[in-house]
């Protein structure tokens, strides 16, 4: 690109900045940072999963396509910074990449240091920073060379070397699996309190994130769908052992599709990932698996995880709001 971005292209340039940022985080961390993007715009541009310790980082991306007086000028609506733990990441969009300097600062610090004012009666925060930071700038501690961006998100070169390798996921999804994912997404989307995120790329155990708008807690879901019919009342649930990453914030949801009736059964499972190996076994082909017989009283070891599908949304909301410990 040689021509500068115009005012009418502001939205497009912002999208380009965001996707270059997500790609840069993935590249610099060698997959140690996994990006989830929102399925609805509710104030968070992305949730970045730091695989080394399981932390979820909420990110607001603020890109600019030109400098004003040699600096990136930011004007941010105060309402978009309601969560003090959100990371504000800003930089300059240049031909083929991002500028040499990036701003990475918690919303709490951003609001403390930026100039508070109003626009059309709405509170805003304004600030600016240059591509060649001065040591006397109040923003200097929060500026970082672009090639070292991931260090500000808690990933250092030694840590990158020890990021667990994740086996490649299949590039296809079965129709049944996609149907189950869509069903869970639809049910959770009914909640005004949940903001949903999908991974880009889909390369870890969690394939759907739910962020609670009030508690700001995050839960990751891996969704498994099995098909049953009159002749096959049980099915095997499988997961790839090499890519199975357990964490207190990650759960498996198992749905059953009744082929004869073309509907999902009310019976489903909600299994903490850390409990999966308690109910499953690993076969000789690198899979963790267990048998699931929905709508049966003989669940045995699955009883603690048995739920009703219509109540799944409420269960997820409870997990995200219950007191820790």
Image: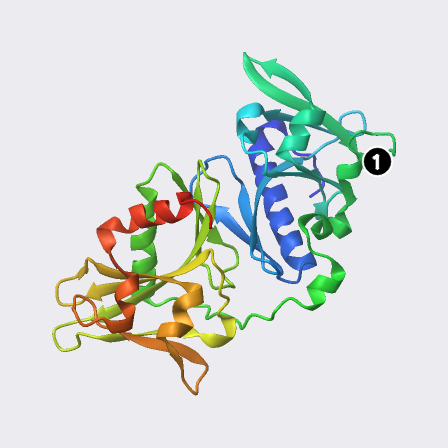
User: Quick one: SS at disc 1?
Assistant: loop
| Quarter holding residue 17 | top right
**24 and 95: which is toward the camera:** 24
Quadrant of the rendered structure where residue 107 is?
Answer: top right
Q: Residue at x 58, y 38 (%)?
A: 86
Kindly identify the residue that appears in the image at 68 percent across and 23 percent down: 126
**Place of residue 60 in the rendered image (x, y in percent of width and height, measured from the top left):** 59, 38
Q: Visible in this render: residue 238?
A: no
* Image quadrant occupied by the N terminus: top right
Whole-percent x, y for residue 35 in the image:
55, 53
Residue wearing tag 1: 133
Residue drawn at 43 percent across, 64 percent down: 273
Residue drawn at the location 16% of the way across and 68% of the way down:
297
Q: In this view, does 318 lie above or below 289?
A: above
Residue 120 picture quarter: top right
Q: In this view, does 48 lie to the left or right of 312?
A: right
Most foreground residue, 11 or 146: 146
Residue lying farthest right?
135
The residue furthest top is 121
Is any part of residue 146 visible from this angle?
yes
Residue 309 position in % (x across, y down) = 24, 54
């Amino acid at each position: 690109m040689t021509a500068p971005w115009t005012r009418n292209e502001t939205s497009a340039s912002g999208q380009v900045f965001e996707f270059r940022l997500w790609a840069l985080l993935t590249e610099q961390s060698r997959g140690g940072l996994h990006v989830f993007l929102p399925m609805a715009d509710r104030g968070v541009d992305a949730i970045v999963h730091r695989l080394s310790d399981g932390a979820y980082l909420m990110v607001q991306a603020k890109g600019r396509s030109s400098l004003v007086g040699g600096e990136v000028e930011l004007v941010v609506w105060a309402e978009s910074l309601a969560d003090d733990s959100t990371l504000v990441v800003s930089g300059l969009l240049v031909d083929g990449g991002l500028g040499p300097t990036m701003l990475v600062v918690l919303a709490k610090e951003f609001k403390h240091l930026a100039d508070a004012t109003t626009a059309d009666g709405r509170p805003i925060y304004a600030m600016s920073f240059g591509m060649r930071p001065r040591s006397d700038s109040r923003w200097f501690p929060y500026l970082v060379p672009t090639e070292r961006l991931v260090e500000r998100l808690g990933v250092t070169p030694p840590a990158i070397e020890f990021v667990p390798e994740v086996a490649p996921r299949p590039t296809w999804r079965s129709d049944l699996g996609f149907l189950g994912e869509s069903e869970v997404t639809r049910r959770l989307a009914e909640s005004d309190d949940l903001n949903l995120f999908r991974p880009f790329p889909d390369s870890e155990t969690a394939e759907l994130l739910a962020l609670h708008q009030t508690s700001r807690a995050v839960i990751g879901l891996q969704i498994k769908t099995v098909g049953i019919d009159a002749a096959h009342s049980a099915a095997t649930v499988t997961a790839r052992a090499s890519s199975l990453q357990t964490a207190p914030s990650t759960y498996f949801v198992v749905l059953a599709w009744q082929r004869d009736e073309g509907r999902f059964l009310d019976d489903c499972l909600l299994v903490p990932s850390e409990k999966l190996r308690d109910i499953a076994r690993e076969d000789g082909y690198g899979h963790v698996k267990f048998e699931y017989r929905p709508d049966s009283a003989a669940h045995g070891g699955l009883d603690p995880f048995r739920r009703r599908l219509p109540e799944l949304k409420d269960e997820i909301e409870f997990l995200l709001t219950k007191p820790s410990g």
